[in-house]
Amino acid sequence: MTDSPIIRQFTTAVIDVNDLEKEAAFWGRMIGEGPGPVKSNGGWLTVGAFPNGVQLVLQKVAEPKETKARIHIDYLVDDVDTAISEIVELGGRQISEPRPGGGVTMAYPEGNEFCIGSFTRTKDGDRLPQ
């Protein structure tokens, strides 16, 4: 066994959704991209790329979200209060009050959770100002 990583790069985040068009409009505005064409008989579409190059794909599923997801994505924003307002305006909702330091749990229109904040952290958990 070598010390080289098995995973070389994080390339794509896939979110399961029920309403592909509604979620594409929401996420397109969130990342500032015009969603691409629907593929595979309405099965999925690529919304676009985050500034770091990771692609965001929405995949249509039949079953609704019923429980808390075991994984979520954190997003860096310039201003938490402004981002909360804009996300709610797009059909998302605020799940938590701001935590110490400014992180907030939000949900996209179909209910999956994600977090926003105006900072990132090091491997040791120290905050990196943006």
Image: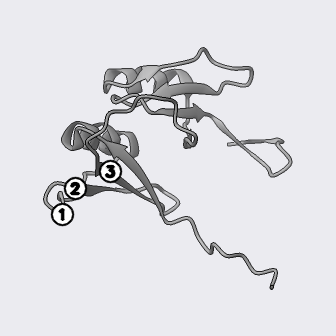
Q: Is residue 91 left or right of residue 68?
A: left
Locate residue 55, reporting x and y percent.
Answer: 42, 60
Question: Is 3 drawn above or below residue 76 in the view shown?
Answer: below
| Residue type pointed to by label 1 | Ser
| Residue type pointed to by label 2 | Gly
In percent of the image, x 81 and y 52: which residue is there? 123
Q: Quadrant of residue 3?
A: bottom right
Residue hosting label 3: 58
Q: Is residue 96 left or right of residue 47?
A: right
Question: Is 12 drawn above or below residue 15 in the view shown?
Answer: below
Considering only order in the chain, which callout, 2 or 3, is on the residue closer to the N terminus? Answer: 2
Of badges 1 and 3, nearer the viewer stands 1
| Residue type pointed to by label 3 | Leu
The alpha-carbon separation of the residues under discs 3 and 2 comes to 9 Å
In percent of the image, x 31 and y 41: which residue is there? 17
Locate residue 84, reporting x and y percent.
Answer: 47, 23
Disc 2 crowd rating (10 Å Cα; few below 14, some 14-19, many 20+) is: few
In percent of the image, x 63 and y 72: which residue is there? 7
Identify the mark at residue 40; answer none if there is no mark.
1
Q: Quadrant of residue 22?
A: top left
Residue hosting label 2: 43
